[in-house]
Image (spheres, grey):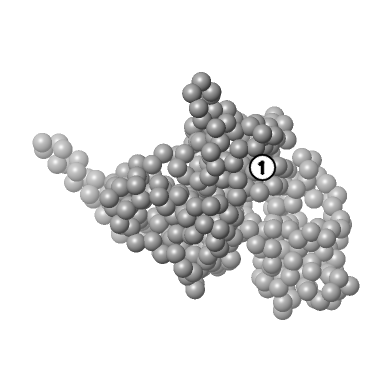
Amino acid sequence: MKTIWMSLAGLGMALLIVTAGGCAASPTAGDSSTARQAAGADVKWDDDSAGYLTVNNNVNDPLILFAGTINNRNIIGGIHAGATRRIDFFDAVSDYSGSFLLRAVKESAYRSKGSSLGSDDIIFAGIVAYNKNDPRPIQVDINRVLGGDACIIIQNDTSMALQIRVDRPDGPTLTTLAPLERNKRVYMDFNPDGYFFFPVYQYYDRASMGIRSVTAKNLADGISMMPEIPRPGRDIPVINFDSNPAGLFSPFATLIVTNETNRGGYLLQGSSRKTNKNGTTMVNPGSETYELNLEKQERLLIGGMFFDVNLGQANNIPIPEYDYRSGFNYQVRIRQGQPASITQLNKSDTDDFVITLVNER
């Protein structure tokens, strides 16, 4: 008994030291919510006027959204079927900057099961990177094919987040797996032609302090598979994206687009608007980050890019043709009345392919 009390005292002192240092304790198993607690959870469904996160729910069910693991403490709001709403999640994350895995669960599933629900109850997950000291608009789209009767199992054996895209490598995000998350059941609409699933691994780049993407050299451009409707005698198909850091590379150049005009604008590649890392297209005065796909090449000469300041096509600001190198960061400065300038910055840090997520047990 004496040994036990000494151990508890030591643990209490350690927690006291952590709290005194200003660091919030990580969620533990004690943060789970029972079905009764979940049933009585007070969930907000209308817009937050100060919210920087916009979520588009394209599925046919009301969803409850969580910043991290599934419990009442991490609820950041609900969203009705087919709705769009703005959410203020800052109170749910104690760190001033970082990233979390946004999880979406059908309201009926959470109310009846609480934290004991299974991974197949999680309709959607996606990485949200934030900085409270420099908040930027973030947009997340929940794919309309999610939440159906057909199922596929996806496994992630890396220390990175695994983003699954459909149709093409830069296609819409289906969902995201946490580091080392296995046996993840994803329910989708049945499609007799199947789907193409593309893996994009996400890690934290210490050089630019942002979330970056890598792909696996030894994987085909996409793995085709047809999700099955579960029934006796039929196995659910499994996709195992099992890669190691030695087999990964970044076929992207990172563009930090700095808008020094007095109006918002759009980064164009040809006539298409590019989407930045926060899921939005407009760049207000200030900076936004983009990933430029180099089509699996180590370097690529790219032209035909412009910055549209909404003054008509003739006034689009041209971005010079440039020889971009994979894994490098570039600053693109946009100034009214003159061509954009491009400066090569540092190389992304690929020594440690890991991502740390807040509010995870």
* Image-based side of 164 in relation to 32, left or right: right
Residue under the point 69% across and 47% down: 171
**Residue 3 image position (x, y, % from top left):** 15, 36
Is 211 or 112 nearer to us in this picture?
A: 112
- Label 1 crowding class (10 Å Cα cut-off): few <14, some 14-19, many 20+? many
Q: Quadrant of the N terminus?
A: top left
**Residue 136 image position (x, y, % from top left):** 58, 66
Residue under the point 65% across and 37% down: 191
* Image-based side of 25 in relation to 281, left or right: left
For residue 199, which quarter of the picture? Answer: top right
**Residue 83 image position (x, y, % from top left):** 54, 61
Residue 183 seen in the current view: yes
Residue under the point 74% across and 70% down: 265
For residue 342, which quarter of the picture? Answer: bottom right
> Relative to 344, does residue 136 appear above or below in the rendering?
below
| Kind of residue indicated by mark 1 | Val
**Residue 280 image position (x, y, % from top left):** 65, 62
The single residue placed furthest to the top in the displayed view is: 233
The single residue placed furthest to the right in the displayed view is: 314
Mark 1 secondary-structure assignment: strand
Q: Quadrant of the C terminus?
A: top left
* Image-based side of 181 in relation to 112, left or right: right
Residue under the point 66% across and 42% down: 166
Is 151 or 272 nearer to us in this picture?
A: 151
Residue 205 seen in the current view: no
The single residue placed furthest to the left in the displayed view is: 1
Is 1 or 223 nearer to us in this picture?
A: 223
**Which residue is the site of mark 1?**
166
